[in-house]
Amino acid sequence: MNISFDIKQFVETFENSCQKVKKKSFSKNQVITSYIEKRNQLCILLDGSADLVRYDLNGNRTIVDHFSKYDVFGEVFYMVSTNNELFVEAKGKCEVLFYIYDDIKKKCKTNCKFHETLTELLPELILNKVTNLNMRIELLTKRSIRDKLVGYFNLISSMCLTKSFSLPFSLTDLADYLSVDRSAMMRELKLLKEDGFIEKTGNKITLLYK
Amino acid sequence: MNISFDIKQFVETFENSCQKVKKKSFSKNQVITSYIEKRNQLCILLDGSADLVRYDLNGNRTIVDHFSKYDVFGEVFYMVSTNNELFVEAKGKCEVLFYIYDDIKKKCKTNCKFHETLTELLPELILNKVTNLNMRIELLTKRSIRDKLVGYFNLISSMCLTKSFSLPFSLTDLADYLSVDRSAMMRELKLLKEDGFIEKTGNKITLLYK
DNA sequence: CATCTTTTGTTGCAATTGCAACTAATTTTT
DNA sequence: AAAAATTAGTTGCAATTGCAACAAAAGATG
């Protein structure tokens, strides 16, 4: 994420200067927030990674979104009519900035520098979020597991600028992220190997095509 | 879309007051814009509806996104590494506002009222976009055609506040939007009817459950 | 370091989905 | 109003995917 401003540095400098902005730490598997009508809160992930997960009535777990450094998340981004329960779960140690606002468009009442700067930063963070979401939709609309995997690998590869990379997910989570059955995905991974498209050792992938 | 500001009215009042903002009209099936590195342009749909479509190498057409009044779209929302060609196609008569900026965070050089107001409006428009994208992801991550259809119907229903509604899509387009095979979707629709979950006359759906 | 838990890897089988190839109905164009 | 084009609706069959149920490996925990 190429944010043109060192948010973490900024947060550390101004910490606790505004009542409505709070930094909290979380450890692995803790629930950072659940999406149940706390609609005037917005979270920024300052460190670590976290997943937005949904459990449907059949017990299927879906990784609706995956957050890493400087990702923005929160109930604001969801429609009120969403009928599934969504949780943000820490994948490891996380630092999260909770940003409470009265009206997302208006400045903090106390008009503090902290709030003001964050508000100015928001459009960029949200725009960044939009590109991520669109990327994800591009993956999800692919018609086969193979296309999803290859599409995903291509993205990672073009972001790392290398044909060899480690997956930021466990394979179990990757399946949940691509919204496919894990064993079916494993099978497809094996076929991709057999067909000579990829090499795979542990969670390190090497693309052999192009 | 509940935008707390009458954009269209505003545009009409200030039209042509800034060189970098232009309104254009389109008729059915015209390409409004294609996503090929015109990254400093942003479009707002003032009237009509349009689809963002992708054609992959196998000729599959996917409706990547569907835009209606006051939706924002453009290359900015996509990563540079997107390797498919994306087109925005008018579904009927459309009015589109093209908004050219040097830096999305900075004001227009001439500092005109028009640009300024639009810039202030942007976060809201983009936030609105995020909720739409998340809604779409929620649909796409459903594991079966039936779940996708039901999820989609529920959304429409809760937006219209009625159990009876007309689809904003042709069935062909709906299949492309849900990213499933059309005939398989038709089959599932028939099953939903047979199982007494829905009623369907033309493109009007009535939900019979709950 | 022994145990418990999670993740990975595999497979047969069933269910779902996609594909192809139609016909019918509707809409658009000339 | 006839012809052309698009959309809706069907169906058999093949391919893909999901499910269940494992064993093996790796990682976490006391």
Image (cartoon, coloured by chain):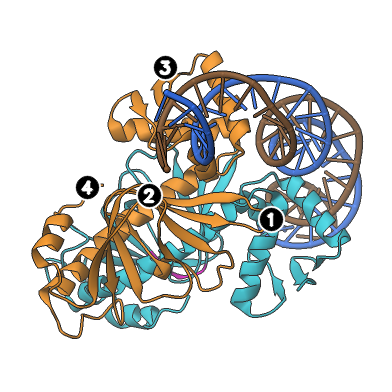
Chain colours: A orange, B cyan, C blue, D brown
Q: How many marks?
A: 4
Give the prevailing secondary structure in the magenta stretch.
strand
Q: Read off the magenta span.
A: B44-48
Magenta stretch: residue B45 in it?
yes
Asked if residue B33 shows in the view, the reply is no
Q: Label 1, label 2: how many angstroms apart (C-alpha)?
A: 31 Å
> Are the two marked residues, 2 and 3, in contact with CB atoms closer than 8 angstroms?
no
In the depicted structure, whether residue C11 falls above or below residue A157:
above
**Which kind of residue does numbered mark 1 sit on?**
Asp
Which sits earlier in the primary sequence, circle 2 or circle 4?
4
| Residues at marks 2 and 4 on the same chain | yes
According to the picture, the residue beneath numbered tag 4 turns out to be A2
Question: Which residue is at 55% across, 14% downward?
Answer: A194
Question: Which residue is at 44% across, 40% downward?
Answer: B85
Q: Label 3, label 4: how many angstroms apart (C-alpha)?
A: 28 Å
Q: Which subunit holds the residue at mark 2?
A: A
Q: Residue furthest left?
A: A13
In the depicted structure, whether residue A76 falls above or below residue A3:
below
- Is B3 positioned to the left or the right of D23 in the image? left
| Residues at marks 1 and 3 on the same chain | no
**Quarter of the image where one finds residue A122:** bottom left
In the depicted structure, whether residue D1 falls above or below residue C20:
below
- Is B128 positioned to the left or the right of C5 in the image? left
According to the picture, the residue beneath numbered tag 1 turns out to be B147
Q: Nearer the viewer, residue B169 or A64?
A: A64
**SS of the residue at dot 2?**
loop
